[in-house]
Amino acid sequence: MQRPRPRHVALVPAAGSGNRMQSGRPKQYLEVLGRPLIRHALETLCAAPDIDRVYVVLSVGDQEWDSHDWSDLAPRLVSLFCGGASRADSVLNGLRAIRDEMADSDWVLVHDAARPCLAPWHLERLLSLSDDEVGGLLAVPVADTLKRDDGHGHSVETVARERLWQAQTPQMFRYIMLRRALERARGVTDEASAIEAAGLRPRLVEGDASNLKVTYPLDLHMAEWILANRAR
Ligand code: C5P
C-alpha cells in the first residue's frame, strides 16, 4: 500500500517576553503597519497552499491573544497555550501537544513569531527540500568581518567568515526527528542545533536579509519599511 504524502504544518513559538525591545509588551503584539507583529507571518503561513495547519505556541498566561480577531485565519490557525521557559521548550511543548495529529514523517516548519517579513518565496525555497531525508533551514552567508572580544570591549580575534551562515527561520524537519532531537538536546537556540547534535546535517537554503528578526527597537522600523515597500 502506498504511504500518504507527508503533510507540512507550521509551528510558531510566540511565548517570549521580548525584553530586549524595552517596551514592556510582548513583542509579538507590538504594532507593525497597524497590526500585531505576529499577524504578518501568520498570514503568509496560512496563505501558503502547501501548509495544512499553523500552530501558534503562546505562554500559558498570555493575556492578549484572545483580544485580537483571528477569525479570518481560521480554520488553519490553531492556538496552543503551552509555552515553556525557553524557545526550545516552547517548540517541544507545541510538538507534544500536536502528537495525535502528526505522522512521524510529516514536516514541521518552525518559524519565529519575531520574523514578520517572511515572504511566499522564502517558503517556496524551503519547501523545495520536501524530498530530503533530514530537512533544513533558511540562512544567509555572513557578509561582515567578525570579531571576538576579550570580555572588556577589545577585539582579540578575527573569525574567518568563510562557510559561516546566519540561521533564520523557518526551519523544516520531520516531526519525530525534531521531537526526539529536542528531547535530547537541552539549551539549544534553534531546531537545527538539536538536529546537528543528533549527528545529522540540516541543509542550508539561502534566504535573504529581508527575513529579519525583530529584536531591538530599530528592527521594528526596518520591518515596517520592508513590508510597506513590498506591498507597493
Ligand atoms: O527572544 P527571541 O527573539 O530569540 O525569540 C525567538 C522566538 O521564540 C520568538 O518568537 C519568541 O516569542 C519565542 N519564544 C518562545 N518561548 C520562550 C522564549 C522565546 O516561544 N520562552
Image (cartoon, rainbow, N blue to C red):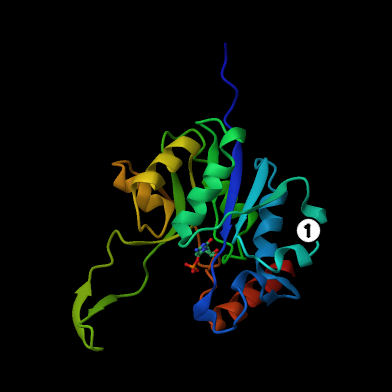
Q: For numbered disc 1, what is the local secondary structure?
A: loop
Residue at screen point 54% across, 34% down:
106
Q: Is residue 221 above or below residue 119?
A: below
Residue 182 rendering spot, x and y as whole percentages:
40, 47
Say which of 132 and 17 sits in front.
Answer: 17
Residue at screen point 38% across, 43% down:
181
**Direction from residue 20 to residue 227 in the image, left or right:** right
Amino acid type, callout 1 = Trp
Looking at the rendering, which quadrant does residue 67 occupy?
bottom right
Q: Which residue is mark 1?
A: 70
**Direction from residue 202 to residue 222 in the image, left or right:** right
Residue at screen point 60% across, 73% down:
27
Residue 209 rendering spot, x and y as whole percentages:
50, 67
Quadrant where the C terminus sits is: bottom right
Task: Farthest residue to the top: give it.
Answer: 1
Say whether residue 171 is visible: no
Residue 125 rendering spot, x and y as whole percentages:
54, 48
